[in-house]
Image (cartoon, grey):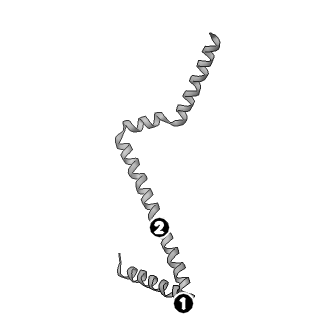
Amino acid sequence: MEQQMNELHRLTLTWTRQLEKSRIAEYTQLLNRPWRLIWLNLLSGTARGVGIAIGFTFFAATIIYLLQLLGALNLPIIGDYIADVVRIVQRQLELNTY
């Protein structure tokens, strides 16, 4: 009987540790406060949007820079195509003054 009680106690402790690790209490508190949930989702969505914008800007600038370098090499077919793409992008940047 005592061995079964010890085993049950050990199992209960294991479950409580796993529940604490999963932060189930914090999650239920968050669900009970909908305005806080909305605020956190708004904040995280804004951070993701800013991160995507910065990342895309860096990526696009790198691609344009590489295309300009390739265009300067005067490769026969590829050079003309790249020069056209760079010219189009530069015109768009000149037209869109924010």
Q: Amino acid at mark 2?
A: Phe
Rate crowding at label 2 as few (under 14), some (14 to 19) or many (20 or more) other CA atoms within 10 Å: few
Residue assigned mark 2: 56
From the viewer's perspective, is the residue at label 1 or at label 2 nearer? Answer: 1
| SS of the residue under disc 2 | helix
Quadrant assignment, res 97: bottom left
- Discs 1, 2 touching: Cβ within 8 Å: no
Which residue appears farthest toward the top when viewing the image?
1
Which residue appears farthest toward the front when viewing the image?
77
**Where 32 falls versus 15 (above or below)?**
below
How many numbered discs?
2
Give the alpha-carbon distance from disc 1 to disc 2, as whole Å: 30 Å
Pick the residue in front: 84 or 46: 84
The residue under the point 49% across, 88% down is 80
Residue assigned mark 1: 76
The residue under the point 45% across, 62% down is 52
Location of residue 37 in the rendering, given as x and y in whole percent from the top left corner: 38, 44
**Where 81 falls versus 11 (above or below)?**
below
Location of residue 55 in the rendering, given as x and y in whole percent from the top left corner: 49, 65
Location of residue 63 in the rendering, given as x and y in whole percent from the top left corner: 51, 75
Give the quarter of the figure containing the N terminus. top right
| SS of the residue under disc 1 | helix
Q: For this view, does 70 lie left or right of residue 42?
A: right
The residue under the point 53% across, 33% down is 20
**Where 57 falls versus 96 (above or below)?**
above
Give the quarter of the figure containing the C terminus. bottom left
Rate crowding at label 1 as few (under 14), some (14 to 19) or many (20 or more) other CA atoms within 10 Å: few
Location of residue 96 in the rendering, given as x and y in whole percent from the top left corner: 35, 78
The residue under the point 45% across, 82% down is 85
Pick the residue in front: 39 or 24: 24
Q: Amino acid at mark 1?
A: Pro
